[in-house]
Image: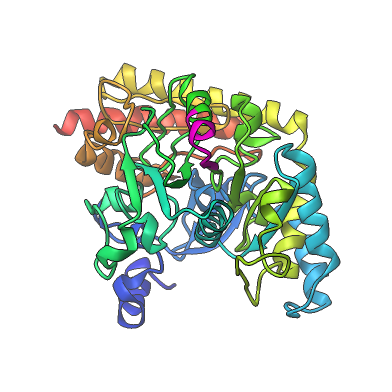
């Protein structure tokens, strides 16, 4: 049997750090990463045959459960016809239509290959539409790894204690303003757009005050800046109509990813027709991609969205509530200091006494405590994300019995961590 250690040794010889995304290397929690051989429903199996209850779920891309038969069948059928054409397909029209039908503020959508491409392209479009250069983002909000957006990013950036990245020239971020999350910035008429996670999910789960998104919309209106919702995580996770429906606020542009690909690589950005008309071939804002609208990804995404009806969201929220309340009770009973916030189907885990409201608050989390809990849970067959700034993604495959198993493991794991201190 191949071991995780053996695979990691091999990986490090051919892949920088042995991984293709930094947090996977377990640098923040220590130890050797597990290598997934297969997955089904709420479970993954590693290279050593160990079954783990998976709360990572491809960082939110999986909502129905791994290898869902409807999605697998859609991918299989699409693959029989070919995997990429570099030409338009009916599948991409179907997926684009489903997104537009579900999100009222989106008249048209352009499909791309990742969340990073979506945010990067949306900002270029906003600049082209407004004729302005400057953009504003919020500290701790992660919008992908485009140069202009790596200032004060969350998630992996927080995990590695980086405020930016080597290789990004000062000129690339010269027109990027970073403001504190959950505080309304004062904009001027040089700002092309404000991009925001409507519920922050890359510095742990940080929920803004109820008026923040509404006031942000008003401030953008005051100066003629566009408001961009980065819904790569929250899209079709908070609600059927995403954050616009949840908050009752209409952004100008919305970025999507993860769920809309059914587990395959994809991204998208969309908005009002008059803004989207600036894109080539209609307008002067260039954006392109050989694999954009890939027939496998669009088939998988359409299959996934077809199963996300109102009943599914009721189930998702009930599952998330059971998990969040169960974990909080387990930690409290064990004397492990942590808070477990929840927003609809998103669940956070903050190792500290007070819930964070911004990036500075979030960075006070007990990273060592999280690392100890992570490994104690892993030994009990539950996989959390290997970083204290990620969140938990319960899905439709996490039955009540599975959630109860997670909670029981959490109680034992927390007690072990407390006893070892």
Left or right position of 365 against 108: left
Can the viewer see residue 67 in this picture? no
Stretch in magenta: 219-228
In the image, residue 334 lies at what x, y percent? 29, 21
- Most distant residue in the bottom direction: 14
Q: 334 and 189: which one is in front?
A: 189
Image quadrant in which the C terminus is located: top left
The answer to which image quadrant residue 206 occupies is top left
In the image, residue 278 lies at what x, y percent? 66, 59
Image quadrant in which the N terminus is located: bottom left
The answer to which image quadrant residue 84 occupies is bottom right
Magenta stretch containing residue 226, yes or no? Answer: yes
Q: 408 and 265: which one is in front?
A: 265
Magenta stretch containing residue 292, yes or no? Answer: no
Please say if 36 is above or below 302.
below
Identify the residue shown where x is 34% and y is 30%.
412
Identify the residue shown where x is 68% and y is 54%.
276
């Amino acid at each position: 049997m191949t071991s995780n250690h053996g695979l990691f040794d091999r990986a490090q010889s051919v892949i920088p750090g042995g991984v293709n995304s930094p947090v996977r290397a377990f640098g923040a929690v220590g130890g050797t990463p597990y290598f997934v051989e297969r997955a089904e429903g709420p479970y993954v199996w590693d290279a050593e045959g160990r079954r783990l209850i998976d709360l990572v779920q491809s960082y939110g891309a999986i909502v129905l459960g791994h290898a869902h038969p409807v999605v697998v069948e859609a991918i299989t059928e699409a693959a029989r016809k070919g995997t990429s054409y570099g030409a338009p397909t009916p599948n991409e029209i179907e997926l684009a239509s489903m997104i537009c039908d579900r999100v009222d503020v989106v008249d048209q959508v352009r499909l791309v290959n990742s969340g990073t491409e979506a945010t990067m392209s949306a900002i270029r479009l906003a600049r082209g539409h407004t004729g302005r250069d400057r953009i504003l983002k919020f500290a701790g909000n992660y919008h992908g790894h485009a140069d202009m957006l790596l200032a004060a990013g969350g998630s992996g950036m927080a995990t590695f204690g980086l405020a930016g990245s080597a290789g990004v020239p000062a000129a690339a971020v010269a027109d990027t303003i970073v403001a504190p999350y959950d505080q309304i910035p004062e904009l001027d008429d040089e700002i092309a757009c404000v991009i925001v996670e409507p519920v922050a999910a890359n510095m742990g789960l940080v929920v803004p005050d109820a008026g923040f998104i509404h006031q942000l919309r008003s401030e953008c209106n005051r100066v003629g800046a566009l408001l961009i919702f980065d819904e790569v995580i929250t899209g079709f996770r908070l609600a059927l109509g995403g954050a616009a429906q949840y908050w009752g606020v209409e952004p100008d542009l919305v970025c999507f990813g993860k769920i809309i690909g059914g587990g395959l690589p994809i991204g998208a950005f969309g908005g009002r027709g008059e803004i989207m008309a600036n894109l080539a071939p209609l307008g002067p804002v260039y954006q392109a991609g050989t694999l954009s609208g890939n027939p496998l990804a669009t088939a998988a995404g359409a299959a996934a969205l077809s199963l996300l009806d109102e009943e599914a969201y009721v189930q998702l929220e009930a599952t998330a509530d059971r998990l969040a309340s169960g974990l909080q009770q387990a930690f409290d009973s064990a004397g492990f200091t942590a808070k477990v916030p929840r927003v609809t189907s998103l669940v956070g885990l903050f190792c500290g006494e007070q819930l964070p409201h911004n990036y500075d608050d979030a960075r006070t989390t007990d990273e060592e405590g999280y690392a100890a809990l992570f490994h104690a849970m892993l030994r009990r067959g539950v996989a959390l994300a290997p970083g204290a700034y990620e969140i938990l993604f319960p899905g439709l495959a996490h039955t009540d019995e599975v959630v109860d198993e997670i909670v029981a493991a959490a109680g034992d794991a927390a007690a072990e961590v407390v006893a070892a201190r």
